[in-house]
Image (tube, grey):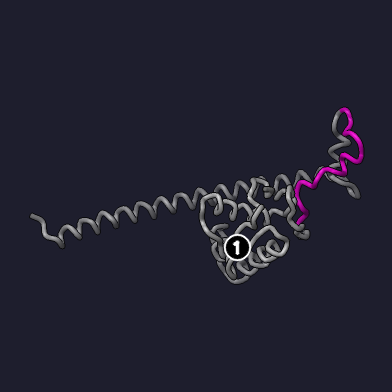
Amino acid sequence: MSSVVGLLEQHELAARRRVDGLREEVDRIQAELARAEQEWLEWTIARERVGAALSVPGGDSADAVAAERPGGAGTEAEVRASPPVAAKTKSQVPVWREGLARRALSADYQRILAALADRVRLGQGPLTCQEMASAFGMDVVPAKVEALRSKAKRLVARGWLAEPAPGRFTLARGVCGPDGGS
């Protein structure tokens, strides 16, 4: 018959092996996430460069695309009425309203919204800016964290995010669809 201490040691060893296995899996998933985020960033940059290449000096990129379309583009009012694909770098954050897509924000703001949307989708709680920096693969240093905090506070002020507790951010009510609409 085994002793109680011997049984406890066996269970402890099994638990330790499970923890080690899960840590290895977490490391693998984090590496895969970092690769996927890098690929996403590269595609975002490519989209921005294509948008810049299609824009005409003094004009709108939508006008340039319309001019190149075979068969015309319809009326000038239709072209002007189409929403911008993405905000320019260093642009202001628009106030959120029903139907406004995340694409109206610059890439950094879209990234914050995507991370928080994933948290909501998974039933997880709000994030701190330190947790966001870590999730984005950034160095968790005061300068980086404060830059994220500034962006998150701006999104709160414009109605995209909510701050249920000081320093913890989540999507605002109604900002839950895949593009930021309801």
Q: In the depicted view, which residue is nearer to us: 143 or 123?
A: 123
Residue at image mark 1: 169
Tell me if 166 is positioned left or right of 26 in this view. Answer: right
Main secondary structure of the magenta stretch: loop
Residue at screen point 64% across, 56% down: 173
Q: Check the image and report above or below for 94 versus 62.
A: below
Q: Position of residue 16 (x, y in %)?
A: 29, 57
Q: Position of residue 72 (x, y in %)?
A: 89, 31
- Which region of the structure is painted magenta? 71-89
Tell me if 28 is positioned left or right of 93 in this view. Answer: left
Q: Check the image and report above or below for 8 versus 66.
A: below
Specify the quadrant of the image occupied by residue 142: bottom right
Q: Can residue 129 be seen here?
A: no
Q: Position of residue 87 (x, y in %)?
A: 77, 53
Q: Can residue 41 be seen here?
A: yes
Q: In the depicted view, which residue is nearer to us: 150 or 167?
A: 167
Residue at screen point 35% across, 51% down: 21
Q: Residue furthest top?
A: 71
Q: Residue furthest left?
A: 1
Q: Check the image and report above or below for 7 versus 146.
A: above
Residue at screen point 90% across, 47% down: 59
Total of numbered circles in the picture? Answer: 1
Residue at screen point 39% across, 55% down: 23
The disc labelled 1 sits on which kind of residue?
Phe
Specify the quadrant of the image occupied by residue 1: bottom left
